Amino acid sequence: MKLFSFLKANSFVLLFLAVLLLSNALISFWNPMESSRRFYKNDFTKTLFHHSWSRSGPVFFGNSSVTGAYIEEKSASPLVEMGLSYGKLTDLQGILQKDLYQIKDQLVIGIDVHTMIDSLETDATYQWFKPWYQPYVYTYRDYFRKTGEDFVKNLSNGSLAYTPSWIDKMLYFGQQDQAWMKDKWNDYDQRFGWMRLKDFQKNLDALDWVIAYAADHKLPLRVIWMPWHPDYKHPPYVAELKQAVNSSLEAGSVPILDLMDTFDAKYFHDLVHLNRADGAPQFTKEVDAWLESLRKP
């Protein structure tokens, strides 16, 4: 009787909660941040889209330096190019921990001068950042608001048409001029040049986690130090960071290809991105040759 009385007295509140839970479940199942072109798409979703929504395969993971440098369709043994805007090792750990992608056959990680920076802001819409308990609409409220505003605006003009969200990743063509790159180097130096090893600790821990994950799953793991423009000195923290990263990799018997200082200036678009016409094809060839050498007894 007490239970019945409680349910009757609170029927409106309970019905309201049930509607909220049901609507959240339905919207989550729809998952418009992935499924609807009316909504913004992050680079992880773009990766899935360009691979027919497959969530398994061999992967080349990294940030935008990987996106710009690796041409999957020209590779002799193509890996799924999973370069993410502002991608970090903590992102890879999140993908694997939440079982958002099944990496098979081999995992190649590209690390550049920014991949390990703990405080570097990233894309808040990446799927692994959403807490399980947080309502879908609340998590992506800014994007629902923007899509809703666009819908109302178009409807007021008598149209249901919309411009589909951009579904391709950023590629890098041509070369930035020296003045632009000097300003960019100064910007990087001001933002990150003071950093020391403690400022990379979360990503160093994530690297150790990924090494252990690969060993547990018998997943071949390879790491590439991504190219840096030869006309500009390394950020001050790079030597210490490379030593720490390489120490972990060597302890885990992980093969390393260091391409940080091997590309001429003509191959670059800016300080950290190879240009698509010359740099990316050369990078892809070198990665193919290295991976093939690892297959030989």
Image (spheres, rainbow, N blue to C red):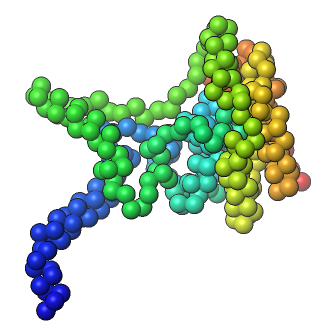
Quick check: 239 left or right of 18? right
Looking at the image, which residue is at 70% across and 43% down? Answer: 200
* 230 is higher (above) or lower (below) than 142: above
* 34 is higher (above) or lower (below) than 275: below
Looking at the image, which residue is at 17% across and 29% down? Answer: 153
Where does the image place residue 5, in percent across and percent down from the top left? 12, 85
Where does the image place residue 40, in percent across and percent down from the top left? 37, 37
Looking at the image, which residue is at 17% across and 65% down? Answer: 16
* Between 100 and 187, the one nearer to me in the picture: 187
Quick check: 157 left or right of 297? left
Looking at the image, which residue is at 44% across and 57% down? Answer: 131
Q: Quadrant of the N terminus?
A: bottom left
Q: Count numbered badges in the picture.
A: 0
Image quadrant assignment for residue 230: top right
Image quadrant assignment for residue 133: bottom left
Where does the image place residue 20, in percent across and percent down from the top left? 23, 61
* 151 is higher (above) or lower (below) than 200: above
Where does the image place residue 145, in percent across and percent down from the top left? 26, 39
Q: Is residue 281 visible?
A: no
The extreme bottom residue here reads 1
Q: Is residue 118 visible?
A: yes
Quick check: 188 left or right of 224? left
